[in-house]
Image (spheres, rainbow, N blue to C red):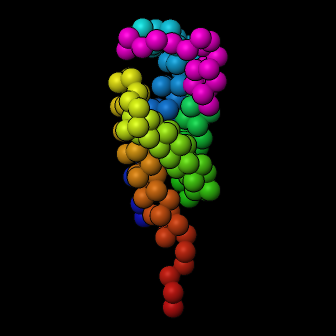
Amino acid sequence: MSGSRPVSALFAVGALYDGLLGLAFLAAPSAMFARFDVTPPNHYGYVQFPAALLVVFGLMFLAVARDPAGNRNLIPYGILLKVAYSGIVSYYWIAEGVPDMWKPFAVADLVFLVLFAWAWAVLRRAAVPPAR
């Protein structure tokens, strides 16, 4: 299928990004906050639950990377994840300000959002038979 190799590579990178980021905040949240000199929340469970969700999404992105056409139905969920994070952080970044720790992740998720939307469109076009 045309375009499936770049889509596979994109989702493999997305799986690594979200999976490793999730594991870092799941396994060592205090180190992550200390590294960026950000006051942690009053309970690390507030960070570890979304971190675990990132690991789950990383596994989902790995499934898409392995079979983009067969798992293209999962891509909108990845797009929505990226909309949620980049949208919320961007809003607060503009409205009130957020610690610098969160800004690179918002920018990266915005880039992934655009690329995931491109991938979804590529796979959708490839799945539609040409008109006669």
Is 40 inside the magenta-drawn segment? Answer: yes
103 with respect to 87 (left or right): left
Front residue of 123 and 87:
87
Considering only vertical position in the picture, is 102 above or below 72? Answer: above
**Range shown magenta:** 35-53
Question: Residue 111 location in percent, x, y?
Answer: 37, 45
9 with respect to 67 (left or right): left
Can residue 103 be seen here? The reply is yes
Question: Residue 2 location in percent, x, y?
Answer: 43, 64
> Which residue is rendered at x = 52% and y = 49% of the image?
79
Question: Residue 88 location in percent, x, y?
Answer: 49, 39
Front residue of 88 and 106:
88
Considering only vertical position in the picture, is 91 above or below 128? Answer: above
Residue closest to the far bottom: 132
> Which residue is rendered at x = 56% and y = 31% of the image?
54
Can residue 109 be seen here? The reply is no
> Which residue is rendered at x = 60% and y = 28% of the image?
50
Residue closest to the far front: 96
Instruction: Tell me where residue 93 sits by quadrant.
Output: top left
Is 123 inside the magenta-drawn segment? Answer: no
> Which residue is rendered at x = 55% and y = 14% of the image?
41
Badge count: 0
